[in-house]
Image (cartoon, rainbow, N blue to C red):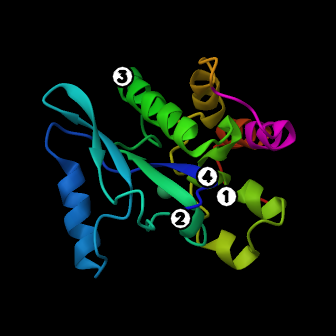
Amino acid sequence: MNFKYIVIHHSFTEDGKVVNWQAIRNYHLSLGWKDIGYHFGIELINNNYEILVGRQLDEIGAHTYGLNNQSIGICLIGNFDSKEPNENQLLKAVILVRTLLKIFNLGVESVIGHRETYVLYKRGIISYDVLKENIKSCPGFNFSMKKFREIVSKDENIRVLDKSFLKELNDFDEKVLNQRKIFWI
Ligand SMILES: [Zn+2]
């Protein structure tokens, strides 16, 4: 699989101590999908955040309309429109993302929040019709993608391959978090 992006999502559900991952899987199966749409999930299980596996990496996911054939989908269980992500959950995501960036030889600007598909539209990478299906706050108004990428970058092996794209993403992310709204043209 020729992955270009790692897309970060939230589940929009509260993270309890039960396995929401399985509930999401059951829901996706009920839609007639062959498995849960994400490749990975990060969920609180018995007081520890754990990385859960969904689709295998040699399978196309179902998480970001129009971008599934070139992206890995990671879902952090929780609703980050209503609360901040937990630091330990973020840390697990950082570890996972760093590993994937190294394996697939990608720069940190490949790590995008679902909502940041807007930047791909602005760059002409996806069409307006594709963008329309992805107008969401995901992974939440309290989840800073800029901050997340900064933490991911605190590893000397993580590179930036496209500085101007990274800047566009970060500028957009700041704007979204400040205004708490996702879409304007
Ligand atoms: Zn999403």
Circle 4 SS class: strand
Residue reaching furthest bottom? 32
| Magenta-drawn segment | 158-170
Return the x and y of residue 174 as percentages of the image width and height. 72, 35
Return the x and y of residue 8 as percentages of the image width and height. 51, 47
Disc 3 vs disc 1: Cβ atoms closer than 8 Å?
A: no
**Residue 35, labelled with which disc?**
none
Of the residues under marks 2 and 1, which one precedes in the sequence? 2
**Residue 88, labelled with which disc?**
3
Look at the numbered disc 2 and say if its residue's Cβ is closer than 8 Å to ligand 1: yes
Disc 4 vs disc 2: Cβ atoms closer than 8 Å?
A: no
Return the x and y of residue 104 as percentages of the image width and height. 57, 45
**Residue behind mark 1:** 117
Mark 4 → mark 1, Cα distance in angstroms: 10 Å
Of the residues under marks 2 and 3, which one precedes in the sequence? 2
Residue reaching furthest right? 164
Magenta residue check for 174: no
Residue at 57% in and 30% down: 148
